[in-house]
Amino acid sequence: MASTSDNSAVGMPQLDFSTFPNQIFWLVVFCVVLFAIVKFFIIPRMEDIFANRRKIIDGNIAKAEEIRLRVNEIEKQIEEELQKAKSQCDEIMSTSGNNIKEQMALALEDSKIATTQLISEAEGRLKELRDGSEAAIEKISEELASEIISKISRGK
């Protein structure tokens, strides 16, 4: 219910100049309190949070750098071990190859000697057989000749 007195303000109450000092006072009080809350409570907490985050990030970066250095050292050790293993492998391969060549040469010499012995033994046996067969042939031919002569002489 609206009163129709002459003292009532016409229009918007926010634009009434009589209330401006009161509004300005409360605006200043609100801004000072808000500034104090932000300055003394919110900003220090945010600074602590940011400082803690920065410490964690710096710690993680330091750990990552340390791990990277360790990884590089391990890679160098692995490369060195790999080079040693390769050189040992090459050395083993060369000595094995030389040993195999020597063994093959010895085996070839042994087989040559064995073959030469077998050939000489076979030649000796062949010579004996030849000599024995010549003697047998002479004996048989003598027997045949005497038999032929005896048959011819009997027949006359």
Image: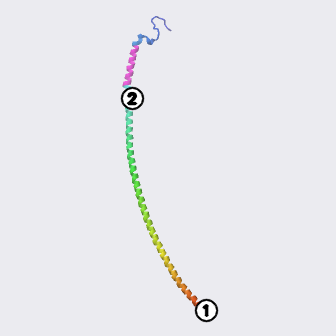
Identity of the residue furthest to the top in this view: 6
Label 1 belongs to which residue?
152
Distance between the alpha carbons at the discs numbered 2 and 1: 150 Å
For the record, the magenta segment spans 22-39
At a point 59% along the width and 91% down the height, the residue shown is 149
Answer with mark 2 or mark 1, whichever residue precedes in sequence. Answer: 2
On screen, 94 above or below 137?
above
Between 72 and 59, the one nearer to me in the picture: 72
Question: Where does residue 41 sit, x and y in percent of width and height?
Answer: 38, 26
CB contact under 8 Å: marks 2 and 1: no
Q: Is residue 24 magenta?
A: yes
Percent coordinates x, y for residue 97 in the rendering: 43, 61
The quadrant in which the C terminus is found is bottom right
- What secondary structure is the magenta-colored segment mainly? helix
Note whether 139 is above or below 6 in the view shown: below
Q: Residue type at mark 2: give it.
A: Met
Residue 119 is left or right of residue 44, and the answer is right
Q: Nearer the viewer, residue 18 or 41?
A: 18
Residue 105 occupies which quadrant of the picture?
bottom left
Q: Secondary structure at mark 2?
A: helix
Which amino acid does the dot numbered 1 rest on? Answer: Ile
Q: Quadrant of residue 49?
A: top left
Q: Nearer the viewer, mark 2 or mark 1?
A: 1
Q: Which residue is mark 2?
A: 46
User: Vertically, is 12 above or below 132?
Assistant: above
